Amino acid sequence: MSDAETDPRFPVTNRSRVRREHHRGSYDKDAVYALLDAAPLCHVGYVIDGAPYVTPTLHWRVGNRIYWHGSAASRFLRQSEGMPVCITVSLMDGYVLARSAFNHSVNYRSVMAFGTAQKIEDAEEAAAALQHFTDGLFPGRWETLRPMTTQELKATSVLWMEIDEAVMKARTGGPGDAVESDFPVWAGTIPMHIGLGVAKPAPEVPEDCTLPAPLAALIASGRLR
């Protein structure tokens, strides 16, 4: 195992270095992984034919790899293979209201990760990755579903990248203008929570086909996954 694999931190480079509010940055792998796992939605940025593109998609992580998928017909996925990409995820935790408009802010957590996009060519490996993705969102669901057809698998591209560099940046706490506390205006934080709501069955689902227990437990847990 290489030093890079055993190092608990990602390397700090000119590309990943936090320059503004650097005290909010972290290169700790566990912190990066935790946010990647907590936020289901990512944005994948790359350059095709000299133009920048950023596409939103769901992602999942296995070890130091980030996976995402999409239509095999997508020109973005076809052309991004072998290209350097930047993947970002973020969660807002609340609004921060200060005594002046200038000092208003938000509490947040974000990650920027850099690597090279690769495509899974083996059909069985792609199917296994998609099963990992599905069960990661909805525990135990894959085995209850109609099996994926060969044509559906051919129509789906699964890409991944090894995380070469990554940085997490976060803001927590209240407004930073306590010195202006003599000004008569309310200041503080308004927390923001993202969670799962009440499940609504499709109209054609029979009444005796109830919500599976693992999904009910997921909703009750208040976690996104």
Image (cartoon, grey):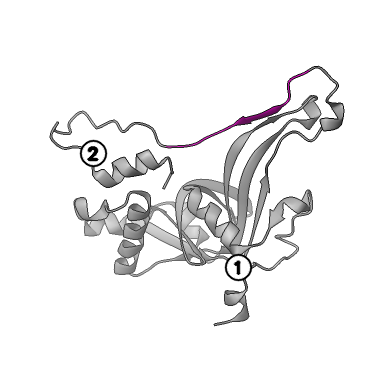
Q: Which residues are magenta?
A: 185-195
Q: Answer few, some or many: residues within 10 Å of disc 1's Cα (few below 14, many 20 plus, some between 14 and 19).
A: some
Tell me the SS state at disc 1.
Answer: loop
Q: Residue furthest bottom?
A: 1
Q: Main secondary structure of the magenta part?
A: loop
Tag 1 residue: 164
Q: Position of residue 60 (x, y in %)?
A: 44, 56
Quarter assignment of residue 6: bottom right
Tell me the SS state at disc 2.
Answer: loop
Residue 104 is marked as: none
Can the viewer see residue 85?
no
Above/below status of 204 relative to 217 = above
Upstream in the sequence, badge 2 or badge 1? 1
Taking depth in this image into account, of 120 and 10 the one nearest to the observer is 10
Q: Residue at x 62, y 73 (%)?
A: 7
Above/below status of 53 relative to 9 = above
Taking depth in this image into account, of 181 and 6 the one nearest to the observer is 181
Taking depth in this image into account, of 119 and 191 the one nearest to the observer is 191
> What is the C-alpha distance between the residues marked 2 and 1?
40 Å
Q: Amino acid at mark 2?
A: Leu
Q: Position of residue 121 (x, y in %)?
A: 37, 68
Horizontally, residue 71 falls left or right of residue 193, namely left
Q: Nearer the viewer, mark 2 or mark 1?
A: 2
Does 196 appear in magenta? no
Tag 2 residue: 211
Above/below status of 173 relative to 158 = above
Does 191 appear in magenta? yes
Q: Residue at x 79, y 54 (%)?
A: 19
